[in-house]
Image (tube, rainbow, N blue to C red):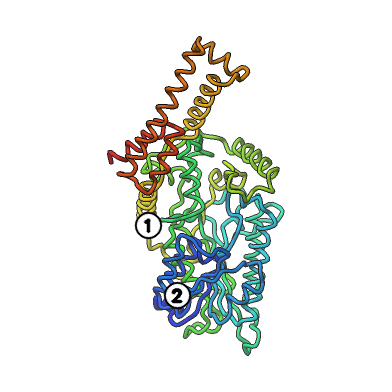
Amino acid sequence: MHLSENEGIEGKAFVVTGGLGFVGSSLCLELVRRGARLVRAFDFRSNSPWSHLLLNNGVHLLKGDIINRKDVDKALRGVDCVFHLASFGMSGKEMLQYGRVDDVNINGTCHVLEACHQNGVKRLVYASTSNVVFAGNEIVNGNEKLPYVPLDNHVDPYSRSKSIAEQLVLKSNGRPLKDKNGECLYTCAVRPAAIYGPGEERHLPRIINLAKLGLLPFKIGEPNVKSDWVYIDNLVLALILASMGLLDDIPGRGKQPVAAGQPYFISDGSPVNTFEFLRPLLKSLEYDMPKATLPVSTALFVGKVFSVIYTVVYPWLNRGWLPQPLLLPAEVYKVGVTHYFNYLKARQELGYTPITSPQEGMAATISFYQERKRKSLDGPTIYEWFFCVFGMSAVIGAAFFPVPILRPACLFIIRSLWALRVLAIWAIAMHVGESIYAWRLAKRVDPANARGWFLQTFVLGFFSLKFLLKRAKQ
């Protein structure tokens, strides 16, 4: 396409479902920058890390649930184009909530399609996923001619639901609009690779937290396994170009938009091994990269074990105290099996070319997470937590309570109950002293987290204090 930068955007009204998310908020801001008359961020949340920025830039925040038809109908009134980004179940505990996954991804999409028909919306861009054609099968330089994975062959409910939703969207292309004198709804689907960038809220924070706790013990698959990533600015550009590709009033093109009824793979165009991709980020944050390698078959077994465990505790999946599973089968395939795609069709039909290189994108991402780390409470690995908490509890319990087995075991080592009690009192005094010192030091070098440093050091002693001392030197 050869259109102006703001073709179909200036003076137009837009809705972005999932508009308070990482991608949705970036898209809303770009639409405003390009001169959109109205931008609505439709989301089930009332706020997010980007809420204030969106409001300050004139974006209208509209709270509602995609599975509520009335909420969707209200959101889509009087708009020219919809970007349907809202989804559920991409990773972690969400993947196991089958009912909610289908409600949001399938029923929610049906509500969007029907609301477009009823409200005369002419353009719908759907954010899909490459998983509609990938289910653990190796794909090298794939394109849009690949067939959909049979619904029974999907390895997780998210991929299955997105496949159904994408097909519904594309089959709705050309549907006559209600009371619009023959005008039609034009639709297309964008299939982004794994998304990264400053503020990404799904993949990178989870990986970083696992690395921080020392829970990234192994890589998965062979070193030559590759997959795609896409930087946030590149994805936002692709979404906007896709909306332009649905315009039916471009001189010389006729009434059939170039993108109508079409899917497009979108990436940075630089397939890479996932662990090598993450290496500079984790290294910049001073976290260890996994050294051991786990075969895909073994990792799948581990993933299935976690899947069974988390299925048993299904009623509590939404509880904050329940941590994310370490690994699930679908995540094994994502990092352990080669699957990448070219964006040739998007380049030829939409004019898409990445505007940010992987090196520039990773540099910006590293800068963001380094700044976030400086503002947060740092701490030791889960192994140090366990060693210190268990060790202190054992010493105190053995010294002052006649705990069976525990007291005899400690006395076997120390030989004297009096000496054991002195050790326990000394350890407690050290922890109290270290925590007070940590609080006073944090008031100077990290006042926002002073209380957190006090509590963490009270529990862990020098295991925590060493991180604060390191920050003080910096």
> Which x, y percent locates residue 119?
61, 81
Q: Nearer the viewer, residue 193 or 452?
A: 452
Q: In this view, does 174 lie to the left or right of 11?
A: right
To which residue does mark 2 refer? 1
Q: Distance of mark 1 from mark 2, alpha carbons?
A: 22 Å
Q: In which quarter of the image is the C terminus?
A: top left
> Which x, y percent locates residue 440?
33, 40
The residue shown at (60%, 85%) is 183
Q: Which of 364 and 150 is in front in this view?
A: 364
The residue shown at (62%, 73%) is 72
> Which x, y percent locates residue 182?
63, 87
Q: Is residue 242 left or right of residue 467?
A: right
Q: Quadrant of the N terminus?
A: bottom left
The residue shown at (45%, 82%) is 11
Q: In this view, does 415 lie to the left or right of 441?
A: right
- Whether residue 332 is visible here, answered yes or no, is no
What residue occupies the far left of the structure in this picture?
473
Instruction: Please tell me whether residue 251 is drawn above or below residue 359 in the rendered image.
Output: below
The residue shown at (55%, 74%) is 82
Q: Which of 412 and 170 is in front in this view?
A: 412
Q: Which of marks 1 and 2 is nearer the N terminus?
A: 2
Going by the numbered disc 1, the residue's amino acid type is: Ser
> Which x, y percent locates residue 265?
52, 61
Circle nearer the viewer, 1 or 2: 1
To which residue does mark 1 refer? 357
What residue occupies the far bottom of the structure in this picture?
181
At mark 2, the secondary structure is loop
Going by the numbered disc 2, the residue's amino acid type is: Met
Query: Few, some or many C-alpha atoms within 10 Å of disc 1 (few <14, some 14-19, many ≥20)?
Result: some
For residue 40, the mark is: none
Q: In this view, does 285 lie to the left or right of 388?
A: left
